[in-house]
Structures are given as C-alpha cells and as structure tokens.
Image (spheres, grey):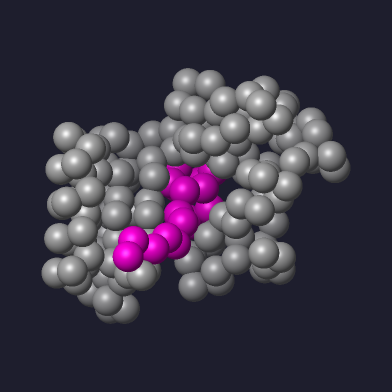
Amino acid sequence: MNIKYKRKCDGCTKCCDGTLTTNVNGEDVYKGRPCRFLGEKGCVIHKDRPKDPCKIYNCEWLINLNIPEWLKPNRSNVILDFRKIENILYLEVKEAGAKLSTEVLNWLLMEHLNNKINILYQMNYGWNWIGSEEFCDLQKEKFKKLNI
C-alpha cells in the first residue's frame, strides 16, 4: 500500500526502537532490542531498507491529520495504529518509552466519546479497551485466550 504521508518523521524513530515487535533483514526487533539499523540520526539503511516491515509500515500520526501535532510518537511516547478485529476498526495505542500520560489518555477518551472510536490502549504496560459492546467482548475473549 502506497500511502502519501502528510507529515514527516523529522527525527522520530519510535517505530524502530523496539516498541513494535518485528523482524528487519532477519534481525528480531522487540522491547529492549531496537532495530540494529537504527543510528543516532535515524535509519542507517533508509535508502535500502526492506519493504517489509519498513516501507509498508504506516505510522498513523504521519498519515492522519486528525491526530494532533503533539501526539507525534517521539513527543507523546505513544504509537498509534488503526487495526481491525473481525472487521471492527479500532485504534491501538502502544506506550513507546514511557507510561501513558494523562494528556494522551484524556485525548483517547474524548476521541471515543466524540467520534465513537473503539480504542485498545496500553497503560502501565497492561492493556485496556473502550468501545462498542462487540469490540469490548472481542478484546475480553482475545486477552482471556492469551491469559493476560
């Protein structure tokens, strides 16, 4: 999917720091183990980075101008991604380097109340959700299966 970015990363590397679990050129990336191609000023192989996951990952902050500027991942310490579970759209919010702030939590709650958005959010490294009854039931079942 080729999405035209409306914003720029400009030094933000939260998607590469181990917050997202992935594999880049055969190297696992996970919490505590950032991408080995992450340098002080960003990706050292940016021109030659692999399609999957690097080129196909779409940071929601980059593409969605409805998300406030202050929610840029390296400022807010959260990564936002729209996802689907059984055809139900929801916003996933992962803590990225710090615990979820009250400002971010307030924004999430207002988004849910004003726009009826289903939200799965990480707080103190545990998972919580708010949304439609169907979405909440699916999340309860998912986390029950994961024994979380």
Residue 108 visible in this rendered orientation of the protein:
no
Counting from the top left corner in percent of width and height, residue 42 is at 72, 35
Residue 77 lies in the magenta stretch: yes
Quadrant in which the C terminus is drawn: top left
Residue 22 lies in the magenta stretch: no
Of 30 and 1, the residue lying toward us:
1
Q: What residue is shown at x 14% (from left), y 69% (from top)?
A: 133
Q: Is residue 104 left or right of residue 145?
A: right
134 over 147 or under it: above or below: below
Quadrant in which the N terminus is drawn: bottom right
32 over 25 or under it: above or below: above
Of 45 and 83, the residue lying toward us:
83
Q: Which residues are magenta?
A: 70-86
Quarter residue 106 falls in: bottom left
Q: What residue is shown at x 49% (from left), y 73% (from top)?
A: 66
Of 119 and 41, the residue lying toward us:
119
Quarter residue 98 falls in: top left
Q: What residue is shown at x 15% (from left), y 52% (from top)?
A: 140
143 over 110 or under it: above or below: above
Counting from the top left corner in percent of width and height, residue 130 is at 20, 61
Q: Is residue 133 left or right of residue 92?
A: left
Counting from the top left corner in percent of width and height, residue 138 is at 21, 59
